[in-house]
Image (spheres, helix red, strand yellow):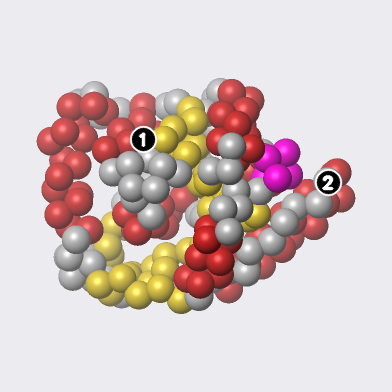
Amino acid sequence: MKFAIPPAPAVRIFGPVASLLARTWRIETIHEERWRAVQEVGKAHIFLLWHDALLPLLWHHRGRGVTIVVSEAQDGQYLAEYARSIGYREARGSSTRGGVRALLGAVKALRAGGAAAFTPDGPRGPRREFKGGVLAAAERGGATVVPLHAGADRAWHLRSWDRFMVPKPFARVRIAYGVPFEVEAGAAGIEAARVRAGAELATA
């Protein structure tokens, strides 16, 4: 998808509008204590979420210095610019472009005790299908995986591969956290983590 306005000026114009919209949402969290318990002991962790639910989850976890892995493609940079404006760090790359560099950036943040966020079906889909190095990053960075998902009672859905969700003004937004887990070393450990992550995201 091509855009007429480059990412930085577009976000300067529309970012405040997006934030104003987000401030109207009525956010309800389910099992947030699961994530808080990981955070309070200073444990490195990875937020694992589907791409379509990204916007309300970005908003809810803003201002915490989380490293977000975003596509180097132009459409990914709009999200990256907005994420930076509300307090995120960035590791550029995806499963299709710059993936190794992004993985190394995320692992570096995790080894320093930080947090990172991955959309394992991004940046181009297929929708809600795992790919990429998210679980390898968790294993190499010694991080806990925190699955989470968001839904809204009223939302717009873009005509994109992921049906990207934008909750409407004053929507009731539900954010649910799955059970955090560790990734065991080796291919078998990563595969077991993939199966578990899929199950947690399906029930979050």
- Secondary element under disc 1, as helix, strand or loop, is helix
**Residue visible at 20% across and 51% down in the picture:** 19
Residue 71 horizontal/vertical position (percent): 46, 32
Q: How many C-alpha atoms fall within 10 Å of the one at disc 1: few (<14), some, or many (≥20)?
A: many
Q: Nearer the viewer, mark 2 or mark 1?
A: 2
The residue identified by callout 2 is: 185
Q: Main secondary structure of the magenta part?
A: helix
Above or below, 187 relative to 3: below
**Residue visible at 53% across and 46% down in the picture:** 115
Q: How many C-alpha atoms fall within 10 Å of the one at disc 2: few (<14), some, or many (≥20)?
A: few
Question: Which quadrant, please, contains the C terminus?
Answer: bottom right
Residue 65 horizontal/vertical position (percent): 41, 42
Q: Specify the segment rendered in magenta.
A: 138-142
Relative to residue 162, is residue 127 drawn left or right? Answer: right
Q: Residue 60's quadrant in the figure?
A: bottom left
Above or below, 152 relative to 183: below
Residue 1 horizontal/vertical position (percent): 34, 32
- Secondary element under disc 2, as helix, strand or loop, is loop
Q: Is residue 99 visible to us here?
A: no
Mark 2 or mark 1, which has the lower sequence index? 1
The residue identified by callout 1 is: 80
Residue 201 horizontal/vertical position (percent): 58, 64
